[in-house]
Image (cartoon, rainbow, N blue to C red):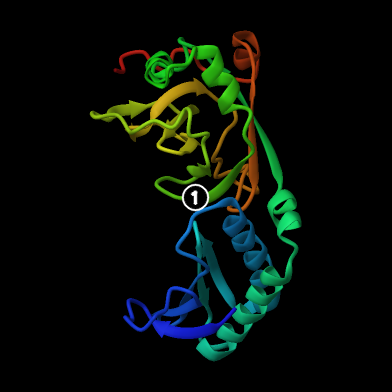
């Protein structure tokens, strides 16, 4: 793999090289790929761990995303050149890792319970009809996949998970809801997610998850991080209630 440092939006950046771009006076952003896929997400996770170890006290923050990592450092302790060397080393470590091991073992495995159904997923029946499947088939397909956390954004704890089986991929709603309840499990295109809080949203709602996706009073404050693997496990109505789930969350909402 070739390593070159560029300014952001530099037209000279080739498409076949790992790209390190100057994002600010004390920040660099590294792009691994133009593709979004589980292996790239696993490499992002491996590089993030290595950079955290290598930079230690020089590091202010690391922000991983689909195929990039923003590195923010203390300019009183280090500089672009030293941080670039650490990025090169982390990338080489990830590049040398066995692809099978990266894909299978990268990140923690997190299991999230879901109460699927027409009561908890107002878009489930419509999604199934559009896909030419039964509701039961959609539920089975959704929980049969091991998803990768590609990025966390939009709201604290909102983890973008991929990739959804193409049989149940669904376009965003033409008219977004003004309020989506906390814990709503949703699909948009080939991504799925759990809404961490009440918010507007245009994803297709297929169930409810009682797990808190963001808790500012806990450490860690999210059950997942970028690069982790997620599987959904169906639970029944009573189990959802026993785990603290709220079935009145759709009242007064479209």
Residue lying at the far left of the rendered structure: 175
Quick one: SS at disc 1?
A: strand
Residue 142: percent from left, percent from top = 56, 27
Residue 236: percent from left, percent from top = 63, 11
Q: Residue at x 45, y 63 (%)?
A: 34
Residue 145: percent from left, percent from top = 62, 34
Please tell me whether residue 199 is drawn above or below residue 222 in the rendered image.
above
Q: Which residue is mark 1?
A: 152
Quadrant of the frame with the C terminus? top left
Judge left or right: residue 134 versus residue 58. left
Please tell me whether residue 45 is drawn above or below residue 146 in the rendered image.
below
Q: Report if residue 116 is visible in the image.
A: yes
Q: Residue at x 50, y 77 (%)?
A: 17
Viewer-closest of 95 and 62 = 95
Quadrant of the frame with the N terminus? bottom right
Please tell me whether residue 230 is drawn above or below residue 130 in the rendered image.
below
Q: Residue at x 61, y 53 (%)?
A: 227
Bin the neighbour count of mark 1 within 10 Å (Cα to Cα): few under 14, some 14-19, many 20 and up: some
Viewer-closest of 31 and 157 = 31
Residue 132: percent from left, percent from top = 43, 17
Q: Report if residue 245 is visible in the image.
A: no
Which image quadrant is residue 212 in? Answer: top right
**What is the number of callouts on the image?**
1
Please tell me whether residue 249 is drawn above or below residue 30 in the rendered image.
above
Which image quadrant is residue 240 in? Answer: top right
């Amino acid at each position: 793999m070739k390593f070159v440092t560029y300014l952001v939006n530099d037209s000279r950046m080739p498409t076949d090289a790992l790209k390190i771009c100057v994002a600010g006076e004390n920040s660099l952003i590294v792009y691994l790929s133009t593709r979004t896929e589980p292996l790239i997400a696993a490499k992002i996770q491996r590089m993030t761990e290595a950079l955290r170890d290598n930079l230690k006290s020089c590091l202010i923050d690391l922000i991983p995303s689909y195929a990039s990592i923003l590195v923010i450092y203390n300019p009183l302790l280090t500089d672009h050149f030293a941080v670039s060397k650490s990025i090169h080393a982390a990338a080489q470590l990830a590049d040398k890792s066995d692809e099978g091991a990266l894909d299978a073992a990268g990140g923690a495995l997190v299991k999230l319970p879901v109460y699927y159904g027409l009561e908890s997923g107002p878009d489930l029946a419509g999604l199934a009809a559009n896909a030419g499947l039964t509701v039961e088939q959609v539920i089975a397909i959704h929980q049969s996949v091991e998803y990768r956390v590609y990025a966390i954004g939009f709201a604290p704890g909102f983890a973008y998970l991929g990739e959804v089986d193409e049989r149940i991929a669904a376009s965003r709603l033409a008219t977004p809801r003004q309020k989506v309840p906390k814990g709503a499990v949703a699909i948009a295109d080939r991504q799925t997610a759990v809404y961490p809080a009440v918010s507007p949203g245009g994803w297709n709602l297929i169930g409810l998850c009682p797990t808190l996706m963001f808790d500012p009073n806990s450490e860690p404050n999210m059950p997942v991080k970028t690069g982790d693997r997620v599987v959904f496990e169906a639970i029944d109505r009573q189990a959802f209630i026993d785990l603290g789930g709220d079935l009145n969350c759709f009242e007064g909402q479209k």
